[in-house]
Amino acid sequence: MKTHPASAPPLLPLPASWSALALLGMLWGQGLAATLYVENSVGQSVLALDADSGRVLATIALLSAPRGLALCPEQNRLYVAGGDAGTVSVVETVGNKVSRTVKVGSAAWGLALSPDCARLYTTGAGNGRLAVINTADYSVRAVEVGHDPQNVALDPQGRWLLSLNFGRPSSLSLLDPLTLARERTLSVADGPHSWALSPDGKWLALGAVDSRKVQLIDTQSLQVVSSYHSSYARPRKGDKMGVFWCNRRPLDEYKPVGDVLGSGAGGGG
């Protein structure tokens, strides 16, 4: 196992059962202190939970199992990727009701929202396509990327957009977030599915489930600088893998502690 650069915080690969936990942390960090939204893939819904008590405030029914969430507090909206249904649901967080369902293609896996909430990105829209939704009028544009894209990562500063292409050979497609022009293709470990940015934005952790690896990417150069093998991310049929960042403990101190939440798709956050 390669060691990460001294200036990079440690990262921890997670099994599928932790993916919802990572998502909770993402939504909390975006400023939604009173309510947490959690994917309920088995129940084809999103749960709205009271952040203090954990009490279920609402169950938001969907047409299919959710495969990604993106929150815009300024709009009071939660966007939900609909997986194999190829839809994105628009949830009004005041009332926790679905106000609109947008068809994007044959699938919608993973979501990324621009900092101004003007554009929403998802993958799996067709055979190797990434779709962008204009949240003002809900128009949809799709572009070709790599084979079998299953997630999308966006730089908070708008410098880059990445499509995580799960097919063989696995890759990342680098696009301009505004024009959607494809600038180059990055080779990565087999099965890229989940991602997480370090708190300082300098490092992108990429979870690759088929190869049981987490790769560390420099967000300035967009080059893979380190690769970690995870004996705890052994893939089984239908499993995914999530990653999240921790700032204090060395990487080698982490040990698996068992399942915490039900299985679900890995995501970014």
Image (cartoon, helix red, strand yellow):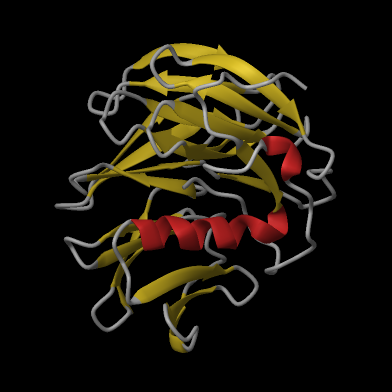
Compared across the picture, whether 211 is left or right of 165 comes to right
- In the rendered image, residue 63, in percent from the top left (x then y), is placed at 49, 71
User: Which residue appears at 31% of the width and 25% of the height?
Assistant: 180
- In the rendered image, residue 179, in percent from the top left (x then y), is placed at 24, 23
Residue 111, relative to residue 61: is it above or below? above
User: Which residue appears at 55% of the width and 45% of the height?
Assistant: 246
Compared across the picture, whether 170 is left or right of 64 comes to right
Residue 65, relative to residue 224: is it above or below? below
Front one among 6 and 198:
6
Q: Is residue 42 visible?
A: yes
Compared across the picture, whether 195 is left or right of 166 comes to left
Q: Which of the 4 quarters of the picture holds residue 11?
A: top right
Q: How many marks?
A: 0
User: Which residue appears at 62% of the width and 22% of the height?
Assistant: 4
- In the rendered image, residue 208, in percent from the top left (x then y), is placed at 68, 33
User: Which residue appears at 44% of the width and 80% of the height?
Assistant: 49
Q: Which of the 4 quarters of the picture holds residue 264?
A: bottom right
Residue 269, relative to residue 207: is it above or below? below
Front one among 77 and 222:
222
Q: Is residue 69 visible?
A: no
For the N terminus, the image quarter is top right
- In the rendered image, residue 250, in percent from the top left (x then y), is placed at 66, 37
